[in-house]
Image (cartoon, helix red, strand yellow):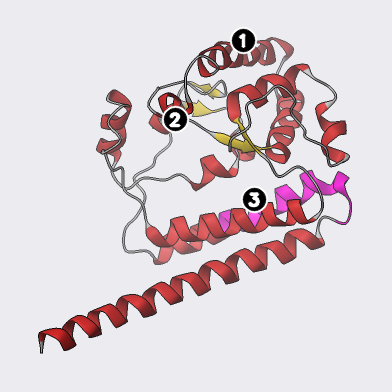
Amino acid sequence: MIALTVFRISDVYQRANLAMNDFFQQTAQTEFQKASQQLPAAKQFQAALTHSFARYDRLIASTIQTASTKPACQAGCAFCCYYKVEVRAHEMLNIKDYLCKHFSAEKIQQVQRDAEQNAAIIRSITPEQHLTTNMKCPLLQDNQCSAYSVRPYRCRNFHATDAQACEQSFADPANMAIATGMIESVALAADAHSQGFEAAIEHKGLDARIYDFNTALLEVLVDESCLKRYLRGKKTFQQALEVE
């Protein structure tokens, strides 16, 4: 009887895992196809990304609505804006375009100074140390993301179900055992969608490398050749740290 019960429980988990895998594959494939259709030429990458963000927002909203657990994230809670962030070239180029359109020259200079300070620290520590070091995002202002509508997928994908644990993690960044919690279905949908878009970018022959956010932000603000390299399918950032 015990052996049979264990088999049945194991079988349930196996079916659940298969269902989740099917959902992931279908979600990623759907986004890949839609993004690919909106990328007839490299120059359309920003429009394609904007459409992808809109689809993502609808997907995550509907997934949260059906989830039994809800995110604890609220406006003004910015503990996660001190975490290590990774970014794709198309996302950073999109952010630069947003900053040039919506930020004053003085505000952009402040962002650049903050990115320079962060980059200096990042280049002096190991990637492992970076994970356990609080570092304010240059785009965080008054505990709000100043470029929220164009924030990268890595930021969009993060959520927590325990606000107190987020605060504890911020206070003790070296303690990797603190679990802030997540909604499995939301995390699965978020990862699948973002990976679908990134696969479309790579399929188009564009730069699909992963870069450190701060060093990429600093480079895109000072090097006008980044966009040209990206559109030619070259490595977009020559100085920014690449994430393996």
Name the magenta segment's main secondary structure. Answer: helix
Where is the C terminus found, in terms of image quarters?
Answer: top right
Residue 45 among those drawn in magenta: yes
Q: Residues within 10 Å of mark 3 (few under 14, many from 20)?
A: many
Q: Return the mark for residue 10.
A: none
Q: Residues within 10 Å of mark 2 (few under 14, many from 20)?
A: many
Towards the viewer: 90 or 148: 90
Residue 175 vertical position relative to residue 69 in the rendered view, above or below = above
Residue at position x 59%, y 71% in the image: 26
Q: Residues within 10 Å of mark 1 (few under 14, many from 20)?
A: some
Please report whichever mark, 1 or 2, sits nearer to the chain's N-terminal start: 2
Residue 41: give x, y in percent of width and height.
89, 51
Query: Residue flagged by tag 2: what amino acid is it?
Result: Tyr
Q: Return the mark for residue 53.
A: 3
Q: Nearer the viewer, mark 2 or mark 3?
A: 2
Q: Which residue is mark 1?
A: 113
- Asked which secondary structure carries label 3, the reply is helix
Residue 145 vertical position relative to residue 13 in the rendered view, above or below = above
- Asked which secondary structure carries label 2, the reply is loop
- Spatial CA distance of label 1 from label 3 is 28 Å
Left or right, residue 110 beside residue 78: right
Towards the viewer: 123 or 220: 123
Residue 81 among those drawn in magenta: no
Q: What is the magenta range? A: 40-58
- Spatial CA distance of label 2 from label 3 is 22 Å
Which quadrant holds residue 20? bottom left
Q: Are marks 2 and 3 in contact (CB under 8 Å)?
A: no
